[in-house]
Every structure is written in structure tokens, then in C-alpha cells.
Image (cartoon, rainbow, N blue to C red):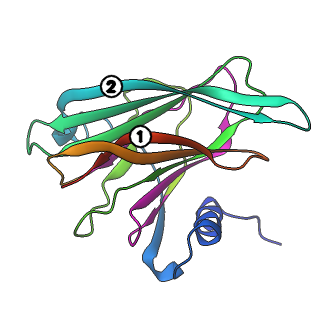
Amino acid sequence: MKPFSKKMAGLLLLSIFTPHALAQIRSWDLKGTTLDQKPDLAGTVVEDTIRTWSWIHSPERYTVNGTIQDRVVRRKSSGNLDFYTRIMMDPQSSSNIFALRKEGFKLPGPYEDANYRIDGLGDKAPGSITHDVTTGLYEFSWQMGIMRKESSKFVYIGSSAKTYDKSGTTSLYAYDSPAILILNTYRPVS
């Protein structure tokens, strides 16, 4: 039997948690990028917020916790906004995070500039991404997860937006846990 692929896992997660046709969902592997490879990523940080999150599994009494770095960057070349996120695991965390989901990114047109920065901070790079065009949902996946004391590379979602607000939702997924919701994260609005 052939093992489950990262892309298939992403499609399965989205099909379980979002009630619509799979034809509107696209997945691809990520290779990462740098400012040298993609000079139009150069820009000015306009927001940079550290947000704390935690989930406690009651029966076994283990905790999954850490912080995310939620960042908005305005590109110098176009004035468009990019939305960056980095996961930082607490040294005492008892489980790994294997997926990060960003909601509230429904923009006009097929805009799929999402990747991770090789030249930025962090230890672990995601292997793939799944994008639901209908709902504006992006999900980055780490095959082996981000373990305690580790952090992810900065992942980003490029946009054609010029403005943003704090009404987005970021969800993290650990093994054997429900979605760990982080509310009021940055998202594009126009």
C-alpha cells in the first residue's frame, strides 16, 4: 500500500473541516525562497506582534503551548501587503504542531503567492501548502511537526491588498488535539 502523501493529507484535512467541493482546493509542495531569489519581497514591517497560545489535554494532562509571531509587511515595489507567521514552541510543550491554518484571506483573483523564507528565522520549514480558493483558507503543513524548543521558518501569504485588519483567525494543529484557535490575527481586507 502506498503511504499517504503530504498533499493528500492537506486535502483530507480541508475536506473534513470545510463543507464544500474539493474542486476549489489546490495543494503544492514548498521549496522556500529568499530575498535574492524574489526581490519583490523586500518591504517595510508595519505590524509585528507576538501572540501566546496554549492547549491542555485534560485526561492525560499534557500541554501544547508556545507563541506565534504575526507580521504584516508592505512591499516596496508594489505597496501590496504580505502576511507572515512564525510558530515558536515552548520548551515544556508536550506535543508537536504539524499544521498552521490562516483564515480570512479571500481575495479577488487567483493570487497564490505563498511560501516560506529560507533566509529568515526559525528551524523547521513546511513541506506543503493547501489553499481553499472559495473560503480564503491557507494551510501550511510540517510532515514531522515542530517540536518543543523549535520554531518554524516564517511562512507568508502574499496579497494584492493595500489595507488589513485584525479579524483573521490562525489555527494550529497538534497531534491528538482539536484546533488551537488564535483570534484577531492580521488579514487582508482590500
The quadrant of the image that shows the C terminus is: bottom left
Q: Which mark is residue 44?
A: none
How many other residues sit within 10 Å of disc 2, few (<14), some (14-19) or many (≥20)? some
Q: Amino acid at mark 1?
A: Asn
Residue at (65% x, 69% y) in the render: 16
Locate residue 98 relative to residue 102 in the image: left or right.
Answer: right
SS type, badge 1: strand
Residue 33 seen in the current view: no
Q: Position of residue 185 (x, y in %)?
A: 40, 40
Residue at (27% x, 28% y) in the render: 47
Residue at (83% x, 72% y) in the render: 1
Residue 99 forms part of the magenta stretch: no
Q: Position of residue 94 (x, y in %)?
A: 78, 28
Number of the front mark, 1 or 2: 1
Q: Position of residue 30 (x, y in %)?
A: 46, 51
- Residue labelled with disc 1: 184
Residue 111 seen in the current view: yes
Q: Amino acid at mark 2?
A: Asp
Question: Distance between the Cα atoms at labels 1 and 2?
Answer: 13 Å
Disc 1 or 2, which lies upstream in sequence?
2
Camera-side residue of 49 and 119: 49
Q: Which residues are the magenta region? A: 130-158
Above or below residue 100? Residue 130 is: below
- Residue labelled with disc 2: 48
Q: Are marks 1 and 2 in contact (CB under 8 Å)?
A: no
Residue at (38% x, 55% y) in the render: 104
